[in-house]
Amino acid sequence: MTREEAHALDLADPLARFRDAFDLPSGVIYLDGNSLGPPPLSAHERLERTSRREWGEGLVRSWNAAAWIEAPLRVGGKIARLIGANPGEVTVADATSVNIFKLAAGALSLRPGRRTILSETASFPTDLYALQGLVALLDGRAQLKTVAPEDLVAAIDDETAVVVLTHVHYKSALRWDMAAVTAAAHAKGALVLWDLCHTAGAIAADLNGAQADLAVGCGYKYLNGGPGAPAFLFVAERHQSAIRSPLWGWMGHAAPFAFEDGYRGAPDIRGQVTGTPPILALAALEAGVDLQLEADPSLVEAKGLALADLFIAEAEASADPELRLASPRDAARRGLHLAFAHPAGYAIVQALIARGVIGDFRAPDIARFGFSPLFLGYAEVWDAAQALGEVLASRAWDRPEFQARAAVT
Ligand SMILES: *Cc1c(COP(=O)(O)O)cnc(C)c1O
């Protein structure tokens, strides 16, 4: 493809108008929206309003007057529309790590007599750590079994309480068939807990269409909710009255302001909320979600995959024999980022960042590039691929300043 052809795709792009809704520095091609989305301009306004008017002037009255108390379910209901769930099935709460712990424990409570939590090896570490911590706490009453992805479906058996899987893998971008895996688990009487961190705002997921049971996801990646934005969780309506959270807090109580001594969990999605919601962070997240809701999810997914396809074609034309695509070539089996393995992966990413092309690195050797459809264009992605080609051809990465590892890669 020529740059002119890429530019022509931008002119015909129905999502092109979203670019102006973001606060992005000039001179940067941002291929890391899958790690931290950039701020929507509206997020700055919401934060300002929430801080000055609602917090500063409204003070404690704003819990009612500005509907702060409803924010977790209100924003959850909006996220529900992006992932094929109903309002009342999704709430914002805690961090993804915490929500995995809560819902995996909840899944065990829904499947008494079954001890196994099944997941895949090389999942995002925090998912595995949360499950390991849960198993350690349960001291023999549950076990975590991890298998390679190709062995996963066959490993589901009548001991399996819950399968915990990331819908789009954080490194390879391999995308599971949500409906097929859920059906296979249900056929064995097991539940599935889906991690949608790299799905929400990227892939047009349909939780209820897939008969999904439980899900969690991140607010700060493709939803552009801000650094450390709170996470969300989904519990299918049919499970809500029976599932129990292992973390009992007053915001999950059936009547928080009755101040009862004994815990009585709310019989709906609120039962998965623990403590006081982070209102400032929710304000930014709501701005990101509102913006996302203006875009057709199927267009978002199609454009992100097309941008990645363009990048693969141009990057491979650079023909560095050591650069290897470590994501599925078939777009239907991928999320919206790409992994390229290269022995100098870290230094290559640093050399690109020095040129204004921001991606990231995932150990041991993966250069990772994300293709957020709302603020990236085809010509820009074409430019980024040429920059990668130039860094490889010139070995510009082979300089001491690009080798030093920072704390966050
Ligand atoms: C980003 C990500 C997380 C992040 O969890 P936090 O609790 O927000 O730090 C968890 N799981 C997966 C698969 C992720 O991609």
Image (cartoon, helix red, strand yellow):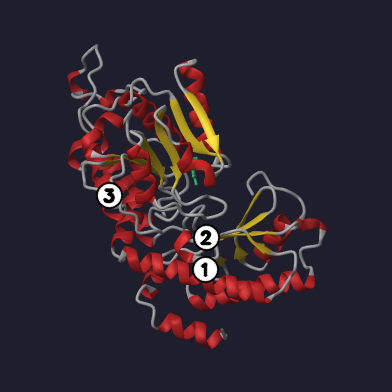
**Which of the 4 quarters of the picture holds residue 161?**
top left
Q: Is residue 86 left or right of residue 345?
A: left
According to the picture, the residue beneath numbered tag 1 turns out to be: 308
Q: So how many labels did they put on this image? A: 3
**Please, what is the three-letter code of the amino acid marked with disc 2?**
His
Q: Quadrant of residue 111?
A: top left
Near mark 3 (Cα within 10 A), the count class, few <14, some 14-19 or many ≥20, is many
Res 32 → quadrant = bottom right
**Cβ atoms at labels 2 and 1 below 8 Å apart:** yes
Q: Is residue 398 left or right of residue 13?
A: right
Q: Which mark is residue 337?
A: 2
- Please give the label number shown on residue 80: 3
Residue 204 as seen in the image, left or right of residue 175: left
Residue drawn at 39 percent across, 35 percent down = 94
Give how far apart the Cα atoms at labels 2 and 3 are. 23 Å
Q: Earlier in the sequence, mark 2 or mark 1?
A: 1
The mark nearer the N terminus, 2 or 3, is: 3
